[in-house]
């Protein structure tokens, strides 16, 4: 008797889409076959005929709230929404606080997640402003313990304020951090903007009395992304350090990722599904700060180049940069200096990527799977346990219904009291989700519990570290 059969769906495997049966036992995929199987041999069967069957989504970039950030949603509601959206793995951050080391940050992250996780999870430690030698040296130990990615910011993002910790890393320290990352076999995530340009732009707009939020793209500019990406990739080249640029927002960012990858450097670019669908013109609408995520939305021209990058393989992943707050919190602040960043779109990521990519732009199903699951799993050291439908892999499977054609309403979604995607027309949407062999969502009904999600230790493969592998 087998545990579960996902029957006769169009299954997107590493070699392309094909009508297959997926047999699942003990939480793992045990076989894929084209033959008719005797249904009596299975405890459970999901009929996936006519459905698109893909690996569970891997969200590489989410900021989950905890006791220090009570204005944000925590692991339980976020991971539940992720699951409804077809995502079975979420990577959060463990932010160092001044005066404490990275292990302390990880304890805080574990407290947030343990027992509250509908999805599997892991964290990227963030080195904060002025990180000391002791914390930087922990990169090596942590990598050995399965925490294999770290994050830095090359800007403090905003003028000094009590609401936001300064995580700016200077290039001197960055050079040492890259040494440690390179030696340890981990990967460095970089929020890359030119700090001096950003702060000059704040000063300039303040003097000109153009302080409203809709000027955000004039603070967090294309030029700042251009210069900072080049500086980071040059230092990474000198240090032999693999880099994952989070939230590429501008054409210039895409171009630098393309240039450095063509030179053989292990550099990877992520964009966000909100960046790929909105522009700074949307800031001008009523309460248009709801669209904001740092650095900023850019022009239509930039949006086109993000899609080009997602289609042609220059960009590797589509993420959310999740920070989930209530509507009240999201629209509370209204100037370029204090507007609330972040996007509660962890549930919409796969459905929007399918609609915009596969349906509107003719993206292959294979490529859709790459940008929503496989590449994040590879880059972050989870592959082939995650990110692929293959014998031996975790049975994390999302069944998408390609016949769904509707305007999204808040009643379709499960996180917070607003969404920038309300009224957005989706064509194709996740219907059922299998998570490590368990039916977690069946026809839109939640069957899982928040004690099911597990912490995932990670190890980055040599292929990812040596050159641009995906
Ligand atoms: Zn972020």
Image (tube, rainbow, N blue to C red):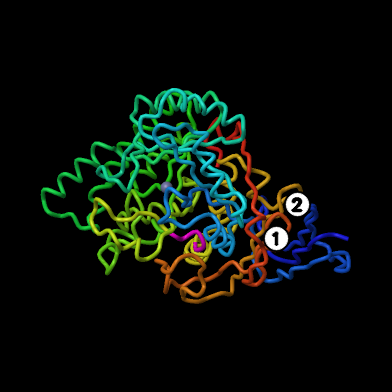
In the depicted structure, whether residue 224 falls above or below residue 18: above
For the N terminus, give its image quadrant.
bottom right
Residue 217 drawn in magenta: no
Label 1 CA crowd tier, 10 Å (few <14, some 14–19, many 20+): some
Q: Nearer the viewer, residue 197 or 84?
A: 84
The kind of secondary structure the magenta stretch mainly shows is loop
State the residue at coordinates (57%, 50%): 113
Reply above or below: 180 against 357: above
Q: Position of residue 416 (x, y in %)?
A: 45, 66
Nearer the camera: disc 1 or disc 2: 2
CA distance for labels 1 and 2: 20 Å
Estimate the x, y position of residue 381 in percent, counting from the top left: 60, 39
Ligand 1 under 8 Å from disc 2 Cβ: no
Going by the image, does 196 lie left or right of 205? right
Q: Which mark is residue 18?
A: 1
Label 2 environment density (alpha carbons within 10 Å; few <14, some 14–19, many ≥20): many
| Residue 220 horizontal/vertical position (percent) | 28, 47
């Amino acid at each position: 008797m087998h545990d579960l059969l996902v029957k006769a769906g169009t299954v997107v495997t590493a070699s392309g889409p094909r009508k297959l049966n997926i047999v699942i036992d003990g939480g793992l995929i045990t076989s894929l076959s084209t033959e008719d199987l005797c249904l009596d041999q299975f405890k459970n069967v999901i009929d996936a005929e006519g459905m698109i069957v893909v690996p569970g989504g891997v969200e590489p970039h989410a900021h989950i709230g905890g006791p220090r950030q009570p204005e944000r949603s925590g692991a339980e509601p976020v991971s539940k929404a992720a699951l409804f959206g077809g995502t079975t793995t979420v990577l959060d951050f463990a932010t160092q606080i001044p005066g404490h080391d990275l292990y302390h940050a990880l304890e805080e992250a574990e407290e947030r997640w343990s027992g509250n996780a509908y999805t599997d999870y892991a964290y990227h430690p963030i080195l904060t402003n002025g990180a000391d030698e002791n914390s930087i040296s922990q990169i090596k130990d942590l990598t050995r313990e399965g925490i294999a990615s770290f994050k830095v910011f090359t800007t403090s993002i905003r003028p000094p304020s009590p609401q936001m910790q300064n995580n700016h890393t200077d290039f001197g320290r960055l050079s040492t951090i890259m040494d440690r990352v390179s030696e340890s076999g981990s990967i460095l995530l970089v929020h890359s903007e030119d700090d001096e340009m950003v702060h000059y732009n704040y000063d300039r707009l303040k003097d000109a009395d153009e302080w409203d939020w809709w000027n955000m793209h004039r603070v967090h500019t294309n030029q700042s992304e251009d210069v900072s990406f080049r500086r980071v990739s040059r230092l990474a080249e000198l240090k032999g350090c693999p880099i994952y640029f989070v939230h590429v927002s501008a054409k210039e960012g895409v171009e630098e990722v393309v240039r450095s990858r063509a030179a053989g450097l292990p550099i990877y670019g992520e964009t966000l599904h909100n960046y790929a669908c909105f522009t700074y013109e949307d800031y001008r609408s009523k309460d248009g700060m709801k669209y904001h995520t740092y650095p900023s939305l850019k022009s239509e021209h930039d949006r086109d180049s993000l899609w080009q990058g997602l289609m042609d393989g220059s960009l590797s992943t589509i993420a959310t940069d999740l920070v989930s707050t209530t509507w009240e919190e999201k629209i509370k602040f209204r100037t370029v200096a204090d507007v609330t960043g972040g996007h509660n779109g962890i549930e919409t990521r796969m459905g929007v990527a399918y609609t915009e990519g596969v349906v509107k732009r003719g993206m292959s199903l294979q490529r859709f799977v790459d940008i929503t699951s496989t590449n994040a799993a590879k880059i972050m050291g989870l592959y082939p346990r995650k990110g692929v439908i293959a014998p031996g892999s975790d049975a994390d499977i999302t069944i998408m219904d390609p016949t769904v054609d509707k305007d999204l309403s808040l009643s379709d979604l499960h996180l917070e009291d607003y969404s920038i995607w309300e009224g957005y027309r989706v064509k194709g949407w996740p219907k059922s989700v299998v998570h490590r062999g368990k039916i977690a969502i069946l026809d839109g009904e939640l069957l899982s519990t928040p004690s099911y999600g597990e912490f995932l230790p990670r190890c980055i493969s040599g292929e990812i570290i040596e050159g641009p592998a995906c």
